[in-house]
Amino acid sequence: MTAEDDRAPIRPTLVRGASIVADTDGQLHRVTRPVVALCACGRSRIAPWCDSTHKLLHRRAGADDA
Amino acid sequence: MPVDGPLTALVVHVLAGDETTRRDALDALPALLPDHHERRLAAARDPHAVLDDADLQRALWLAYEPHYSDLPGVDAAVEWHPALLAVRARLEARLEDAVRAVAAPLLVEHALPADRGASADERARQVVERLRAMTAAEGPSPLARFLGSRATREQYLDHLAQRAAYHLRESDPQSFALPRIEGPAQTAFAALQHDEYGSGDPGRRHSLLFTEALRAAGLSTDRFDHVATTEPAVLASVATMSLLALHRRLRGAAVGHLAAFEATSALPCRLIALGAHRLDLPPAVAAYFEEHVEADSVHEEIALEQLAGALVRHRPELADDVLLGAAACQAVDGHAADVLLQRWRDPSVGRGAGGAA
């Protein structure tokens, strides 16, 4: 985790007003909050929800990610 | 009531006394807490001495308390008594000087560009960028790592007791700032507080989850029981929230403080929850911290962009105050964490031994 200046963490996607979220395996999760943060870095231990693990990861800005 | 020294005694006299003792307290105030410029400069030169001052911090806690709850033997009407407000103002001035002084190095490190001609959108973007930099994870927090992997059961429970002064009333100080926030940021602020208060389910209020954790761990759920043994630096962290939220002129700092608080919560809470599992504590303890892993990962994104960013877009002149509040949160809470780690590393600092001094 060096050269933070040209790297940025992959932040979660905020979703408002959902009642059910399907994860990548198609399993359904009930939503109990008005706004939820969906994991976008793929490393959350409580997926599909974000657990802030992305803050420990860094990616090169403008690299091969979209 | 815990009386640590002349300042605590003064506040107790104001809270529990009659009109004569209140007048006497007002007369004693200038000698006890001189408002001279030099004395305030001294507080700014050694801000940690102010944060660690058991007498001053417990006095301030007592002075704020009528805004939050009933104190035994105290008339609720004292909340707006001029004597209490006068004493509180002097105590707050000391705290504010100290908070500004400890925040200063972080503010220099994350200073905004001098370009005063920047558009409101540009200013908001700059502030959010600096908030992200200020709260970026530089590795696990030493306090959370200690609780996660090394703390004894006794130390872990002491940590819960030390947190009680705030978490039994979690999010209540910030609520005082809600009507003071203008524009679209107010909607984000309300959304955050709504989640803190259970998202419509009274059983999910964070303060209640903490109460249940204390009860399950066999600890008192009465804040008053804990305040006498809470480290002054921890009380200073709670007082900073009241200070920023209760003064409209500091509302930008209240928002910055909340943003930094939310942005530095989820990762430490995960480690602290692991500590509860490691020590086989009752499930309510880990559940409290696990709720914060999920909730505060949401709150961080809302607080930075939709709250702090939106406030600066609406009121660009508050940009510096927002950063001040974030730096204050990092510096004051960082000091409290250092004090707690020291408390547990030093075997002479026993459980329930009270604060420093």
Image (tube, grey):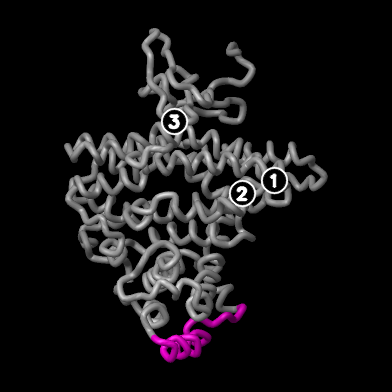
Which chain does tag 2 point to? B
Residue at image position (65%, 40%) is B184
In the displayed orientation, state which residue is furthest to the right: B117
Find out whether residue B347 is within the magenta segment: no
A40 and B181: which one is in front?
A: B181
Residue B301 sits above or below residue B209 on the image: above
- Direction from residue B154 to residue B19 in the image, left or right: right
Which SS does the magenta portion mostly show? helix
Q: Position of residue A3 (x, y in %)?
A: 56, 28
Q: Mark 3 and mark 2 in contact (Cβ < 8 Å)?
A: no
Q: Which residue is mark 1?
A: B112
Question: Element type at marker 3?
Answer: loop
Q: Are marks 2 and 1 in contact (CB under 8 Å)?
A: yes
Residue drawn at x 54%, y 43% is B190
Q: Would you say A39 lies left or right of B229 here?
A: right
Tell me the quarter of the image containing the C terminus of chain B. bottom left
Alpha-carbon distance for marks 2 and 1? Answer: 9 Å
Q: Which residue is mark 3?
A: A33
| Residue B129, image x, y percentages | 63, 37
| Callout 1 amino acid | Leu
Q: Which residues are magenta?
A: B18-37
